């Protein structure tokens, strides 16, 4: 292109030539512009700009988070609430609500950071207090880390809430709040780091897909010790009032069943076939567990009960949880049958043989189910049975047994320590008169029903 100076004389010929040159330049710019724009946007786009697949994963994790929170509120609250006397319904719901509030705040403040910041053997760091410094992609999942933190928060909420079932109708509300807060920090957070945050158990090869060890073992064994420490309800076991509303319990169990799709399916951290496999296994185990429990009940007492089918469903769900993403559908059915059978026997053993008032069978269902599923994982999730577990079965059993044993021992030790620490500060149990009046009125000054 000829140069143009301010003093240049522009003739019609040169003007036409220049116009042609300009048109050519514009044409070339038009062809280059999309490439240049793409390069420019590529250098300026944020690292977390998600494609359609990643957006689907994020949407599923957000949905799963809502489902898991739904398991606690109102699922667990209704499930437990229907099993107690009418005069204690609100107290159970209050405990679940209060634990949700306290656990959520602690998780945001420092719980998540201690569980998932770094891969130190025993505990995470403090680099992500109040969910700061979240990364655009968490690990290999390619989902924003705050989505992962939200999902994990709902697990931190439901785990201490499970323990409530061990001491309903006689526990002091102040003790529940204080114990749950300290237990979350001293038991749940470290074990979550050991198994899911890059800690020493995961380094050994221990597996826990969605919480058989982190959730059910910790809550189950702690619940058993608390039931012993707090003591039995008046009249246990011969003169106990039956559940005031099996209908509420059935409704709560249904919510737990549906919510567990988020619990186990969301643990795949992806909206793909792995999540679908986990949900299929979850559903199969729940159905098999429910059917097995009422069959055992029918045989023993001559009647299949609504409480029985609801409890069997939860037993199957708890047992499949540690291997939901690893087991095939056929193995999941076997897990449900075995889980319900063993948990059914455990409820009778704990209450009738040991005379321990684990009121709503937290240890016998959640604890035993979670530990059993964790131990069965290398066997029933093996490739020979349609699963994905690879490696020597006996070596896998050894690692799983170590993880279960260490987690149970740590949970028991910390729970005992917390009981001793809090006893001088707040009574573990309400007085006899308050227990007789019911915790709704004695503790909260309210009644769930006018006639209660």
Image: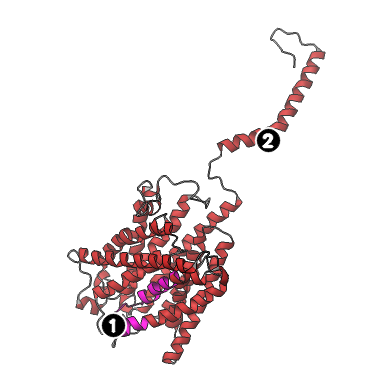
Q: From this viewpoint, is residue 343 visible?
A: yes
Side (left or right) of 404 relative to 330: left
Which residue is the extreme one toward the right?
13
* 360 falls in the magenta region: yes
What residue sits 48% from the left and 74% below the top?
Answer: 254
Q: Quadrant of the C terminus?
A: bottom left
Q: Which mark is residue 355?
A: 1
In this view, the mark in front (1 or 2): 1
What residue sits 57% from the left and 36% below the top?
Answer: 43
Q: Quadrant of residue 162?
A: bottom left
What residue sits 68% from the left and 32% below the top?
Answer: 33
Q: Nearer the viewer, residue 397 or 421?
A: 397
Q: Which mark is residue 215?
A: none
Question: Could you tell me residue 159's position as x and y percent?
Answer: 38, 65
Residue labelled with disc 2: 34
Q: Nearer the viewer, residue 68 or 210?
A: 210
Distance (Cα) linking label 1 and label 2: 77 Å
Q: Which residues are magenta?
A: 347-374
Q: Secondary structure at mark 2?
A: helix
Q: Quadrant of the N terminus?
A: top right
């Amino acid at each position: 292109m000829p140069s143009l100076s301010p003093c240049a004389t522009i003739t019609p010929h040169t003007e036409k030539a220049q116009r042609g040159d300009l048109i050519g330049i514009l044409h070339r710019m038009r062809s280059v512009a999309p490439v240049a724009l793409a390069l420019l946007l590529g250098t300026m786009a944020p690292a977390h700009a998600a494609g359609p697949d990643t957006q689907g994963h994020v949407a599923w994790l957000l949905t799963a988070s809502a489902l898991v929170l739904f398991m606690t509120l109102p699922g667990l609250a209704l499930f437990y609430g229907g099993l107690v006397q009418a005069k204690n319904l609100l107290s159970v719901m209050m405990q679940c609500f209060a634990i949700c509030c306290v656990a959520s705040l602690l998780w945001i403040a420092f719980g998540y950071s201690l569980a998932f910041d770094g891969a130190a053997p025993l505990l995470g760091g403090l680099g992500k207090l109040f969910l700061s410094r979240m990364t655009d992609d968490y690990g290999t999942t390619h989902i924003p880390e705050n989505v992962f933190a939200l999902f994990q928060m709902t697990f931190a909420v439901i785990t201490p809430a499970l323990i409530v079932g061990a001491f309903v109708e006689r526990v002091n509300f102040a003790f529940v709040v204080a114990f749950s807060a300290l237990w979350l920090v001293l038991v749940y957070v470290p074990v979550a780091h050991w198994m899911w945050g890059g800690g020493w158990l995961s380094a050994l090869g221990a597996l826990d897909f969605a919480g058989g060890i982190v959730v059910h073992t910790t809550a189950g064994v702690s619940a058993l010790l608390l039931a012993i420490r707090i003591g039995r309800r008046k009249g246990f076991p011969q003169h106990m009032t039956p559940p005031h509303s099996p209908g509420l319990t059935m409704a709560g169990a249904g919510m737990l069943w549906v919510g567990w799709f988020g619990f186990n399916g969301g643990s795949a951290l992806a909206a793909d076939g792995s999540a679908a496999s986990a949900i299929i296994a979850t559903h199969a185990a729940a159905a098999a567990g429910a059917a097995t429990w009422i069959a055992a009940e029918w045989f023993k007492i001559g009647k299949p009960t609504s409480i029985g089918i609801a409890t069997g469903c939860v037993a199957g769900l708890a047992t499949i949880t540690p291997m939901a993403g690893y087991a095939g559908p056929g193995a999941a059915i076997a897990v449900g049958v075995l889980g319900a059978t063993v948990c059914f026997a455990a409820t009778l053993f704990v209450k009738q043989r040991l005379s321990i008032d684990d009121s709503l069978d937290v240890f016998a269902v959640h604890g035993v189910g979670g530990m059993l599923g964790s131990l069965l994982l290398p066997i029933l999730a093996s490739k020979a049975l349609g699963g994905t577990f690879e490696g020597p079965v006996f070596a896998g059993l050894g690692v799983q047994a170590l993880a279960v044993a260490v987690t149970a021992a740590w949970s028991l030790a910390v729970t005992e320590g917390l009981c001793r620490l809090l006893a001088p500060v707040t009574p573990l149990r309400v007085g006899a008169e308050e227990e007789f009046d019911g915790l709704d009125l004695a503790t909260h000054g309210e009644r769930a029903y006018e006639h209660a």
